[in-house]
Amino acid sequence: MPLDYNKLISQEYQRRPEPAIRSLLSLEKKPGMISFLAGKPNPDRFPFESITVKLKPSAVLSTDPSTGASTELVIDGNTLERVLQYGYTAGDPLFDEALNDLVSAVHGRTRHDDTPAGDFEITVGTGSQDLLAKTSLALFDKGDTILVESPMYPGLLPDLGSRGIHVINVATDQEGLSASSLAQILDEWNQNERTKELSFPKAVYTVPTGGNPSGTTASADRKRAILQIVRKHSILILEDDPYYYLSFEGLEEDSVMRHRSPSYFALEKEDNDPWGYGYVLRFESFSKILSAGMRLGFMAGPKPIIDAVSGYMATSSIHASSPMQVMAALLLQHWGVPGFLSHVDEVARLYQQRRDFFEVKLASVLGGDKNQQRALASWVTPVAGMFFWVKLHLPPESDAPQGNSSNVITKNAVDHNVLAVPGASFYAGQQITPYVRLSFSVIPEEEMEEGLLRLRKAIEDAWKEHGYSTIPPM
């Protein structure tokens, strides 16, 4: 059955009055309307005549890359006048159009196309983190429950914890969120001692591609299994997918034709009778593929929830930077969807090359069999993203039979002048774990081996501190 959004949207949001001014702004577009409405600044003294951005030669569409041609994207005239003023909360019209084309081409769903699949909305935020935070407000009241893959991206944890929202960890495997674990938790909710006193969850959160921190990627079949489970139990999927275009599989194929794992948002088109649509809130970001500093992300999903998120935005950030939105829109216009896909594949190739280089160093320094060197770590090679989720070989402790990476990373590693993120940071409840997240995205290649050597020394020091003269095998 279709979801009941009145039960999913937070009571806190439903108690909020509409923004007094922003709720009327759309009426300014009515022909002949005279408006004393908005306190907009007078643009006559804005000091900008135009905004020009010059593309790198590698980003210019050309049949002959040896020409070294450059292209300038120019915002001026009426467009500049619009973007320098307060804009629409959900997004600038030019960027909204570009996003609609992208979502339609990549995920196979065209908004407002008079089909059930097109019954969704899009809103733009100051990065996907901004949208996630506002989605949390739109969905969860104190005492509500959310399911999260474990380990998980920790950006949501401070918000959830401080607002009294119950967080239940769902196990992961080499494909990320485990369908069997999710099904068991939901099926046994009212019988399990851990959950029977809690409110039934409204949503499950996952990073399905190049998971942060785990580096795992869900197959299409795994996504289908999880989508079937959430439909059965009438909960949402929060599909946080900032690494979607940083998948390494199939990079040898043509950018436009190569197979990309379908998103949960795309898979809603399959087997949707009698479930309908609207079980997926999809979050995407341009931070990893265009620029992190542009602070542009967007979400797509059912209109009632998108409207609630936009409602929070209207009284906080008001809207994402309009000049940045139009700059991105002009770039997407210049490229078209085929050019965009070509660009993101080049970005993915860069990360694939860095992953391969880093893994060689990782195996050399923390792996075994090199001059009878003792292995001090194990890992699964990521097929997307920018992280290795590494299990360190650490001395056992009374409360941590496999060791505690937090102690090693926050003290020993810092003493050796190397930084990483201890695994406990990625679990609700700060679970003790031997894991650590290592990022290979920006560290200079010439520093990778030295950094790993310092990490090895930190691990060796931990064994000595626990009274071991030699390190036992893993």
Image: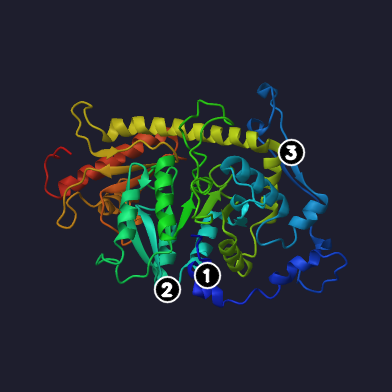
Picture residue at 30% right of the left edge, 45% below the top: 416
- What separation in Å lies between label 1 and label 3 (alpha carbons)? 47 Å
Q: Earlier in the sequence, mark 1 or mark 3?
A: 1
Residue under label 1, please give it: 6
Q: Secondary structure at mark 3?
A: strand
Mark 2 = which residue? 142
**Is residue 375 left or right of 241 when viewed as pictured?**
left
Identify the image quadrant of residue 359: top left
User: Percent from the top left, x then y, of residue 286?
Assistant: 57, 47
- Which is nearer the N-term, disc 3 or disc 2? 3
Q: Which residue is mark 3?
A: 72
Front residue (pair 344, 120): 120
Q: Residue furthest front?
A: 274
Q: CA distance from mark 3 to mark 2?
A: 49 Å
Q: Amino acid at mark 1?
A: Asn
| Residue in the picture at 51% in, 66% down | 4
Residue neighbourhood size for the residue with mark 1, other residues' Cα within 10 Å, grouped as few (<14), some (14–19), many (≥20)? few
Q: Label 1, label 2: how many angstroms apart (C-alpha)?
A: 16 Å
